[in-house]
Image (tube, rainbow, N blue to C red):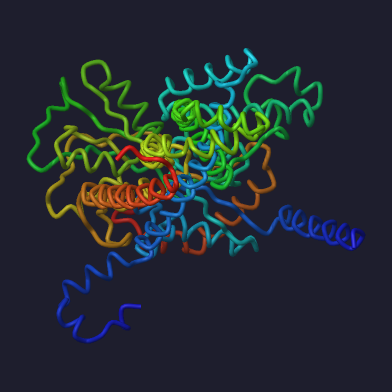
Amino acid sequence: MLEMLPHWLTDWLGPDGMASLAYITNGKHLSWYASVRYTLIAAGFGAILAVFFGLLGAAAKLSKFAPLRWIGDIYTTMVRGIPDVLFLLFFPLAFEQGVEYVMAQWYCKPEELATATGWPLCSNAQWYLSTTEYMVLACFSLGIVYGAFAANVIYGALKAVPKGQLEAAHAFGFPSRDVFWRFQVRQMWVYALPGLSNVWLLLLKATSLLSLLQITDIVSWADRLGAPNYSPLAGLVHGDWRWKYYLVLFVFYILLTWLSEKFFAYLQARAGRGMARAN
Amino acid sequence: MSKKWLLAITLGTALVSGQAFAEDKLRVGTEGAYAPYNYVNDEGKLAGFEIDLGNEICKRTNMTCEFIQNKWDSIIPNLLAGNYDAIMAGMSITDERKKSITFSDEYKPVDPSLYLVKKGTQLDFDKLEGKSIGIQGATIQDGFAKEKWGAKNTLKSYEKADQSLADVMAGTVDVVLADGEFVRTAVAGSNGELEIVGPKEMIGGGIGIGMRPDDTKLHEKINTALAEIKKDGTLETLTKKYFTEQK
């Protein structure tokens, strides 16, 4: 691949520069760059699910039906209080064992169930999680945790929509459902976006925890590549280079944050179209 | 249309499940962070002594090897879970491990564990006190160090062996106890910054392939292939290729 570079560039880089370039484009490093997909997928789907759970949570908190309101309140208080690291460890494990428990009732022989001492209850009731399953569970974990934050933001934003707007809609004869979706939800985005952008940035940072679920994401690759290597058979011999790789991750996350801010500024302008403004 | 679909799906499932149960594939779990036994090379592929040996075994048993990278601390649970069928990860044969898995005959004899320090560190192994000792968690060195040094010293457990190397270089731990060949490789490549000190510790048995206890067929197959590989000198050639000291 490097042979395709023009001569003036290879001359300018010199043998040392070319060696460095060859090193950072070797298979190991290419796998590292490719693993960015896990981070982006988890952030993207996590965010979509967070908005979904956020809307549900906010709707529950606003409900006229008391038990629904309690569920909404319990969801936002409880989940916001649990550290994301813990939840990311707890939820996939609990889900896996829950599924295995159900599988056990289905597939295990009664005598196996009676004598089972460990986990899983029998060898047939074993659900093996690969990276794909872990990714799905990670997206849901992120969605649930940050959905609780989003629910609070959206709840506040829904309340911030001027009452007069909704009363006017009612006066025009819109049914309550339409008043909620076409007036309250439509107008709440302006109030919710600054808060949601914060939630998004928190979620983005939480994607660095994917390696906890055996996913070889950018963080675990950085760990591996930076670890000292003393065996010439295994490639370039070098000492502890982890800080260099972590620094690259810092830059990567800051870059993502900067892009996100641009994107949210655009969304904010879009959501504010046609709205009355004080300035 | 629905009938055609049904047929396609039935055939598809039959094919897929047929492949899954075919015995021509051996899935081997390895750590990929323990040079020269197993590591990820610059191409990003798993390589090392055990990868070559595994492929040799597969060749002789008419199987194809697929190596699966797994963290050390969950490598036995995931074998039992059926994630792969064998472990080749520099794993010593011990009675403790034999309680949950079975081992093939050894493919590498006992190699005494060694102490590794930053060049110039003076340690008195007759009365070692107040030192921090780095070991990889759930290894034979882990259990040994706890028993021998645990009372008067601090043990620092690492998830991966190379993290302990980074820390001994940085001075965060005083000494690391690890597998002999792993230590020798580190010293040889450290440009004189690391050295071996103290006694050689004879811990654990030789290194073997871990398998599920009920997998007796595979056990037999692998042992037969291993015996052949030992007899015709292939194992010696491989050992010479990867290890600095042969025993």
Residue at 23% of width from left, 22% of height from top?
A: B154
What residue do we see at 43% from left, 48% from top?
Answer: A273
Number of labels in the image equals 0
Q: In the rendering, at what x and y percent does residue B195 appear? A: 15, 44
Residue B139 in the image, given as x and y percentages of width and height: 39, 34
Seen in the picture, residue A258 relative to A178 is either above or below; the reply is: below
Residue toward you, A216 or A181: A181
Quarter that holds the C terminus of chain A: top left
Nearest the viewer among A199 and A116 is A199
In this view, B205 is above or below B143: below
Q: Is residue B46 above or below residue A219?
A: below
Image-quadrant location for residue A81 = top left
Looking at the image, residue A243 sits to the left or right of residue A225; the answer is left
Quarter of the picture containing the N terminus of chain A is: bottom left
Q: Is residue B114 rendered to the left or right of residue A88?
A: left
Percent across and percent down for residue A16 are 16, 72
Task: Confirm whether residue B68 shows in the render.
Answer: yes
Residue A56 is drawn in which quadrant? top right
Residue sitting at 16 percent across and 42 percent down? B169
The image quadrant of residue B100 is top right
Q: Position of residue A200 (x, y in %)?
A: 40, 40
Of B204 and A256, nearer the camera is: A256
Q: Can residue B88 be seen in this view?
A: no
In the displayed orientation, state which residue is furthest to the bottom: A7
